[in-house]
Image (tube, helix red, strand yellow):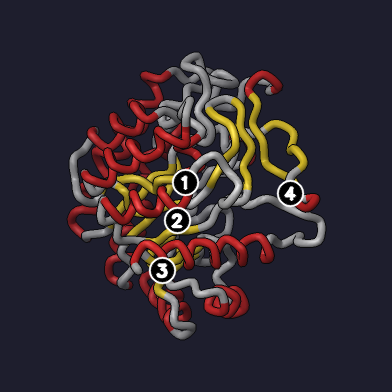
Amino acid sequence: MRLGTQRGPTTDAMLSYFARHGVEGICGYPPSEDEGGDWSLELLSRLREQCEAHGIALDMVQFPFMSSSYVDRARRRAIMLGDEPDRQREVDEAGAIIANCAAAGIPAVKYNLSMLGVLRTDPTPGRGGSSYSTWRLADATEGPLTRAGRVSADAMWERITYFLEQIVPVAEEHRVRLACHPHDPGVPPAGFRGIARVLGTVDGLKRFVAIRESPYHGLNLCLGTTAEMLRNPAEGIHDVIRYFGERKKIFNIHFRNIVGRRDDFQEVFPDEGDMNMVEVMRTLQAVDYPYLVMPDHLPRHDDDPGGRQAFAFGYGYIKALIQAVNA
């Protein structure tokens, strides 16, 4: 396991900041206008060399048009909207990015299959005057439908399967791992704003990885998002890690902690949540998880508008835990 991060932009200033705090590998962000996917081999190679000049590995990038953005604010979401011919065009662009990543020496790509983005209610007060990102389903207002209209679970699975059936063979051909982030957070089976979130349960994630069996098809396992699926995260998180870890389906870890449970939680600093993150790190070690461990969604404070203090804390915390379990 190595300390990683997914913070952007990927500039010399940010890479220097990462290096100072012990980051060893990153999910990088090539320049992209209007969620374009025209990432050339030259551009990706230059980005990898820029990272390596700071002693940092470019372990993965994210598909530019497959982020966690809310569908009504995203220019491109044809894969999840099921819109032809744009859907096939986006699948083809994703395949070209995979091929260029392989040629540039970038071993993984992460992505989201989401339309609602990251759902949250009003933030709540936290440690030292910080602000905790919070989700309380009972307080949530659904509001109008999105431009996607109503999307059933069956429709979601059809769109996900359409993508995987075409893109996983490309990943296999080029030996590039595909790491999908779960839906954050899960919602009741009827959905939210008319949209089912099928990757918001552990059973949904199990079905997802089984759609196309491949060593290059797996998860960006966000521990916070996974905890948000559980009634008892402190106990249940270990079974989830073991299930996917023993099957070698975990390609990236977001090391996030929460207070609460499904439908009612706060995102907190990693040392104060309900999960014992020391034991979580030991479970990752026990399943021989070999890739990056990244801080994610840390609390905010007015004195730290860019989040650098919070993430510096996260980097040090994760680095120390990796050293401790390897001692």
Find the distance from the CA under tag 2 to the CA under tag 1: 8 Å
Of badges 4 and 2, the one in the foreground is 4
Of badges 4 and 1, the one in the foreground is 4
| Labelled disc at residue 66 | 1
Find the distance from the CA under tag 4 to the CA under tag 1: 33 Å
**Mark 2 closeness class: few <14, some 14–19, many ≥20 residues within 10 Å:** many
**Mark 4 closeness class: few <14, some 14–19, many ≥20 residues within 10 Å:** few
- Residue closer to the observer: 38 or 111: 111
- On the image, numbered disc 3 is attached to which residue? 323
Q: Can you give x and y, in whole percent of width and height, for residue 44 in the image?
A: 41, 71
User: Amino acid under label 3?
Assistant: Gln
- The disc, 4 or 1, on the residue closer to the chain's N-terminal end is 1
Q: Quadrant of residue 105?
A: bottom left
Task: Say whether residue 143 is visible.
Answer: no
User: Amino acid under label 4?
Assistant: Arg
Mark 2 and mark 3 residues within 8 Å of each other at the beta carbon: no
The residue positioned 19% from the left and 53% from the top of the image is 172
Reply above or below: 185 against 287. above
Q: Can you give x and y, in whole percent of width and height, for residue 295 in the image?
A: 53, 57
- On the image, numbered disc 4 is attached to which residue? 127
User: Amino acid under label 1?
Assistant: Met
- The disc, 3 or 4, on the residue closer to the chain's N-terminal end is 4
Mark 2 and mark 1 residues within 8 Å of each other at the beta carbon: yes
